[in-house]
Image (tube, rainbow, N blue to C red):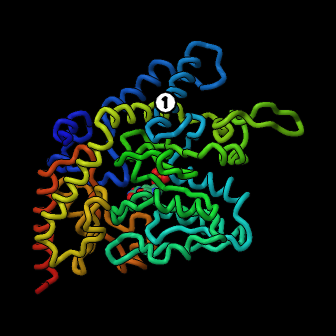
Amino acid sequence: MLDAAKIKQDFPILAKLVYGKPLVYLDNAATSQKPSSVIQTLVDYYEGYNSNVHRGVHALSMESTQRYEEAREKIARFIGSPGSENLIYVRNTTEGINLVANTWARANVNDGDEILTTEMEHHSNLVPWQQLAKARNATLRFIPVTDEGTLDLSNIDSLINHRTKLVAMTHMSNVLGTINPVKDLTAKAHAVGAHVLIDAAQSVPHLPVDVTHLDCDFLAFSSHKMLGPTGIGGLYVKSDTLEQMEPFLTGGEMVQEVTFEGATWNDLPMRFEAGTPNIAGSIGLGAAVDYLEALGMENVHQHETEITQYALQALKELAEEFTFYGPTDPARRGGIVSFSSPHVHPHDLGTILDQAGIAIRAGHHCAMPLVRDRLGVAATARASFYIYNTTEEVDLLVTTLKDALRYFSKSLSLP
Ligand code: 7TS
């Protein structure tokens, strides 16, 4: 098991006091904190070898290019990619998904085709497909969510059919914590000739993820949720599909040869990286991967499973007041606990917890159709865990929630 208290010491921000109280950071699904090693990598870049990549003949540019490409190799290996050319640097998961929607999908999804997604998607893996379906006159279909918060696969053989061109699904829900059987669904999709995109924003930071094992065609993730800087992420694309894809953004960096009439494209993956990239961010993400690899992703996952089970057990005391969402089977959920009460608005809970130094998120978590239409609430409160969270922090969460309930029960004169 990880030593969370020791890990915490690597994160300068976690020594901060909020309203005079130690910060308890439970908003990791929104963004994670960053260890000193990642922060120092950014400082080293700007202080030591700041320069543009892939164009310089001078020492600094050669150093930045080398480190930028070494980081790509490291990140590609981390997700089990067969080569670094399969890993496109993007700003975040959202941009990775939009890249697929605007390139491969625009060229391959046609009138009458179907795109299959699920009822538990983040807006990032929903709105691009709504737009694409409108533009291409295709139909967007949904795998339903059961009352327990898992995918309802009872009708899957009709949902994945010969009209399905793409299955776009989240690996792990940012609201329910559900880990979806993406490998099995990928095999089913491939059996009918469909492509598969996995939104791995919540899985790459928290679970061992291997794109070769999953056999997916596309997989997108964000650096800022996995100890890395903001403004950088990755899109993995399988080789045969990548070779057929037309560029997304055009301009400098992504071209080989330009005349007044036209242009030819650079090698992969630079063909998809127009303009000066986020150099420091990419190298910083490489440092985040080093940190996670040193811990071991199996250990990261195990720590989060344990802390989530500890939290669910401790929160049972409050089961009369709160509805808790997500699967009960620990093997099917990651480190996210969402809950709501008919008597207290999640934003009020968030404010009271904040006064105690505890950061959670309250709202629809950018999954409005799931939260509002499927769970039937305007918002939930959400605690999301990472490598530095301890059982003592969970205890403090539970105690503070009890205080909050006492306060609101009085003012709302509940039974
Ligand atoms: N997909 C999932 C499953 C997510 O949880 C998020 C961000 C995204 C996509 C988008 O990631 P981005 O880096 O492109 O913004 N989720 C959250 C969240 O739960 N709270 O804040 C952001």
Q: Quadrant of ligand 1?
A: bottom left
Residue 397 horizontal side relative to residue 360, left or right: left
Q: Amino acid at mark 1?
A: Ala
Image point (73%, 39%), residue name:
251
Q: Name the side, left or right, on which 239 lies relative to 291.
A: right
> Please, which residue is most extreme toward the right here?
261
Residue 130: image quadrant is bottom right
Q: Which residue is mark 1?
A: 71
Q: Relative to residue 255, is residue 98 drawn left or right?
A: left
Residue 297 x, y percent position in the rendering: 33, 42
Q: Nearer the viewer, residue 282 or 149?
A: 149
The residue located at (14%, 69%) in the rendering is 316
Q: Quadrant of the N terminus?
A: top left
> In which quadrant will I find the C terminus?
bottom left
Does the residue tagged 1 have its C-beta within 8 Å of any atom of ligand 1? no
Residue at 44% of width from left, 73% of height from top?
Answer: 153
Closer to the camera in the image, 109 or 284: 109
Say whether residue 103 is visible. Answer: yes
In x, y percent, where is residue 245?
Answer: 70, 48
Q: Identify the secondary structure beneath mark 1.
A: helix
